[in-house]
Amino acid sequence: MARISVPETMFFVERASRTSLQAQIRETVVSAVLSGRLPSGAQLPSTRKLATYLTISRLTVTLAYQELATQGYLEAADRSSYRVADKPPFNVLGTDVALPDADAVDWSSKLRSTFRVAKQMRKPLDWRRYPYPFLYGQMDPSLFDLTAWRDCARRALAREDFELMAGDFAASDDVQLVNYICSRTLPGRGIRANPDEILVTVGAQNALWIVIQLLLQRGSHAVCENPCHPDMSASLRLSGAKVTVLDVDEGGLPPADLPEQIDAVFVTPSHHSPTGATMPMDRRVALLEAASARDFVIVEDDYEFEMSFLAPPSPALKAFDRNGRVFYIGSFSKSLFPGLRLGYLVAPAPVIREARALRALMLRHPPGHLQRTAAYFLALGHYDAVLHRMREEYHLRHRVMADALNANGLKIAGSAAFGGTSFWIEGPDGLDADKLMAELRDDGVLIESGSPFFPTEAESCRFFRMGYSSIGRDRIAEGVKITAMRMGQS
């Protein structure tokens, strides 16, 4: 059988890509081998021929081929040419395998439930290409110390660290990370906790889901705020419990309106999501007293307290808890970067034991290397330095944005008294925030409609949120002006 010769036209490189030319060549070959497009024995173009075709250095091609040979994908035919190895690292099926018929099974009758119960907060993946991205929860890479993070990631790969983090963390979490949470993070919120009262989670949402599974079932009764984060209300409804939503005011959730016979109350007392309202001390005391007298649990989502540049944030509700009835949820994803997905749950030790067992059934544990990298980043002072830089910049952006909103007649319905990274805007009667969001996107402006925060409302929503963590200070005023003009046309 004649040997197959691979044409050089199969290869291409993108010089603007962050991926090196060598890596692009390797990816092309590996993809073709694993997909079965390149059979064993197929002859690749010589290093000289491929280098000439791609107009790159012959050494680049040679090094790429040599690396593929080391990995077992190729073998040398002579000094300058290579062929696909007889037994590459992965045995692939033939390319003539039929694709499954996606409509052959009625999946609506097979699936136990649908999890698409929350109205999605639509954020385009390519949001960075928009000139005016007023998106909450996204980061500005210029404020983050990537060099320090890389250094910490390398430290976490040292032999001693690697041996620790390469193990199974199901029964425990990274000791350094937990110790930092105990000694630095929680005391800053007025909370004291022991290591056995802390569980590291894959973000705050993972902690919330675990708590809901532990506390609620069909027949339970939970209370949450209105408006509230759509993932919160959706997770509660999926539990099968009865859910009562209480309208918040300038003081957050009103404890006097709590119904009888409840099992859990889910609140954001220090910084209500999304209005930014802070629950005053008399309401906090009333909520804690009610929990003790009526035997229910309070779940506190304490997000974004680190972004305090106007005033110190109020102490966490957990700081006043004397009976262990407050479960506290925190996250590093908001203060570092959203893709980090590291959060934590603080609760009594018996609860954490059950939470750890449930976490192990769900995902075993958060990645060990990520935990140790974050632990180094925190312990070596990089985290505090990043927070300081963020607070200074967000303070300036807050001022510019507040001035722009006022100058253009936009009504600020809420923002965190201590700072934060967003404004909650109230439009005029009749405004459809979903429609406004879609229209502004065509103008290069990204805002977030408030409708997902009101899960029980059937009418159009006139509220929307504008964040400033993801937009440069010099573009805020123009983006707000465009928003105001579009509102006048809607």
Image (spheres, rainbow, N blue to C red):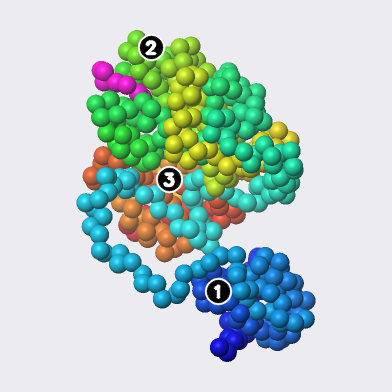
Q: Quadrant of the N terminus?
A: bottom right
Marks 3/1: CA distance? Answer: 46 Å
Above or below: residue 86 compared with residue 106: below
Q: Residues within 10 Å of mark 2 (few under 14, many from 20)?
A: some
Residue where numbered disc 1 is placed: 32
* Type of amino acid under label 2: Ser
**Mark 3 or 1: the one toward you:** 1
Secondary structure beneath label 1? helix
Q: Is residue 305 visible?
A: no
User: Mark 2: which secondary structure?
Assistant: helix
Q: Mark 3 or mark 1, which has the lower sequence index?
A: 1
SS at badge 3:
strand
Residue for badge 2: 292
Q: Quadrant of residue 69?
A: bottom right
What label does residue 465 carry, if any?
A: 3
Give the CA distance from mark 2 to mark 1: 64 Å
Of label 2 and label 1, which has the lower sequence position?
1
- Mark 3 or 2: the one toward you: 2
Furthest residue to the top?
293
Question: Residue at the spot x=46%, y=47% of the render?
Answer: 466
